Image (tube, helix red, strand yellow):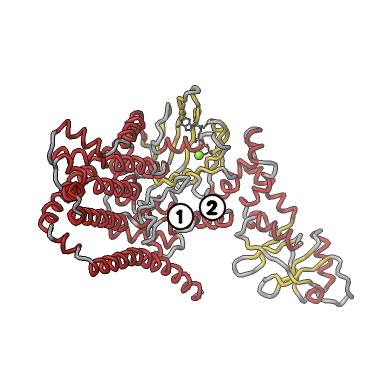
Amino acid sequence: MSEATTASVQVQKSPASARWVTSIRTPVLVWLVIALAVAIWISLSDMPAEILTYREDIIYLGGQHVELVAWSGGLAILTGVPIGALLSRPAFQRVSEALLQGFNVGATIPTLAILALSMTLLGIGTVPAVFGLWAATLLPIVRNTYAGLRAVPQHLIEAACGMGMTPAQMFWRVELPNALFVIFGGVRTALAICVGSAPLVFLIGAGGLGELIFTGIALDELPMMLAGAIPTALLAVVTDFTVGRLQYYLVPRGINPLR
Amino acid sequence: MIRLEHLTKVFNTPNGPVRAVDDVSLELPEGEICVLLGPSGCGKTTSMKMINRLIEPTSGKIYINGRDTDATDPIQLRRSIGYVIQQIGLFPNKTVADNICVVPDLLGWDRKKTRARAAELLELVGMDPAAFMGRYPKELSGGQQQRVGVIRALAADPPVMLMDEPFGAIDPINREVIQDEFLRMQQALRKTIIFVSHDLDEAVKMADKIAIFRSGRLEQFASPDRLLANPANSFVESFLGSDRALKRLRLVRVAEAMLTEFDALRGDDPHARGKVVLEESGLPFAIVVDENGRPTGCLAGNAEAGVDAKVGDLARPVRATISTDADLRLAVASMFAQDMPVLPCVDDGGRLKGILTYRSVVKSLASAEARE
Ligand SMILES: Nc1ncnc2c1ncn2[C@@H]1O[C@H](COP(=O)(O)OP(=O)(O)OP(=O)(O)O)[C@@H](O)[C@H]1O
Ligand SMILES: [Mg+2]
């Protein structure tokens, strides 16, 4: 009897610790390799010094860049989740599939084209840039929210209803939590698209790190281009990591395949 | 008390109207279990869901404790009715404790008290609260999930419960265990329960009343014993199966069927007396008891011995006894298994109270039939 209990305790513990090891070790290893490569490169060339001459530009344009991403990504989440949720309601069942098909077609338009269209509508500057990025970011969020909510098993909804939940309680206590993991997946994809496309907005006059990248390319100035490219890459990595962590911790363990 | 009056539900489908439930009337007294039984698609689930208004009846009335459910707000109504769905339906995003407390939380009850009650309920079904309160449904076995599903419906202590094949998704052995557990709880709780099943054995075991459905119509509504003894028509009869007499064995207690007028022998009785007793009873065996009245052996009619032999020397040990509280199914099973055509029936103290023979079993089934 006591043997059996200790065995079961061990069985419970080992996957938990294993999860920790894998979830920590992988990024750590990756970072170590990157750090090593960077260290070697720094010691071999004077490129870092040249890049650092753009320090002030990096800080100013980087700030602008983050602001653009934050606005468009934030707005996309704030609008995409409710739109997806609304489309998943039975009342919208008729139109939702058609609308989603429309969204899917929209997703095939390259971001650059969206930005161009946005510029023809709204002119140049921050507003059309945020609008264009928002439009490019929106779809994965809407699609995943819709799919996640529709995938909540019908019997859970029936159980909730049969136990006396109001429609609002059913949504907040059962449907949304059970769709959360999929929704987070959409947000993660969407923000990756957003961060990845953000340098393009320089082309419609909204600044950002794209300014260093495109100008660097145009002038054949490698350090200048890298001064834009490296922070952009870092931003993408950090954003994805952050959303990943949020997904890990915010989605309840019962429905989180990651833990 | 639950009363259905001329309840009818017609679904309008693209292929025309479907009468899922057709003019069903029945009345279930408080504290009883009614099992809705019938082939697939006969309208059991639909009937049940009309009680908590998950489906609105096309016509007819439902009264719970005299109150028309139409006059009750559906949300309030559902919170006052325990509901166990066929697929268990535990919320995977909530812990076991939160799952159990769904309805109490909806009712805004004190959190501390409801969690204490959740722990109590878990203990009632033999699950350690310390280990299970914080787990998620995916971390439970199928049987444990089913138990949690049932106690979740009990959490707000509703007077009425609806259970749609609550023990369906579980292997036969564990199903028996959970059924017994549930019957024990019901003995204390005395809920009025509508219970859907398609398993006749389960129905006979659990039900105070069985309602047999065929394509939306109520074919018979009666106690299990009455149903098995007197099927109302050929459909019910064929649904119950040709072995329905055997199924009734479970419904009769040994105490009701055993013979109480018989002579028991003592170990020091002379063999001659043993012979007389055997002859008078016409049975193949006579039971021998000790000074406390406990059966110690049985004397066979063919035992050959001298005139001064004692019964005690000739008796063979008893291979099986049965408690007077057991049901006839168990008794007959051990009569067959141990080849004991005369089975001693004993009370809690192991004292002989009566004997069971094949004839007495057959007779008691017949008299139960006559009682109806
Ligand atoms: N929403 C619905 N729309 C149309 N027809 C329905 C609907 N729900 C049930 N039915 C039909 O009503 C009949 C009764 O269905 P019900 O679910 O009550 O059967 P059941 O007795 O519970 O069967 P089972 O044992 O298979 O669960 C079936 O013929 C079914 O096809
Ligand atoms: Mg059913």
Depth check: give the residue in front, B370 or B203.
Answer: B203
x then y, percent, for residue B8: 46, 28
Local secondary structure at mark 2: loop
Viewer-closest of A74 and A225? A225
Q: Are marks 1 and 2 in contact (CB under 8 Å)?
A: no
Earlier in the chain: of badge 1 and badge 2, it is 1
Question: Is residue B76 visible to the viewer in this orientation of the structure?
Answer: no
- Vertical placement of A94 versus B362: above or below? above
Residue A205 placement (x, y as % from top left): 13, 41
- Where is residue B241 drawn, in percent x and y? 67, 41
**Secondary structure of residue under mark 1:** helix
Who is closer to the viewer here, B198 or A94? Answer: A94
| Residue visible at 81% across and 58% down in the picture | B282
Q: Toward which corner of the image does residue B57 lie, by quadrant?
A: top left
The quadrant of the picture occupied by the N terminus of chain B is top left
Asked which quadrant contains residue A113, the reply is top left
Which residue in the protein does label 1 denote?
Answer: B145
Binning the other alpha carbons within 10 Å of mark 1 as few (below 14), some (14 to 19) or many (20 upward) gives some
Question: Residue B5, relative to residue A175: is it above or below?
Answer: above
Question: Can you identify the residue that label 2 sits on?
Answer: B170
**Residue B35 percent coordinates (x, y):** 52, 43
Q: Residue at x 68, y 57 (%)?
A: B258
Residue type (three-letter) at the residue carrying disc 1: Gln
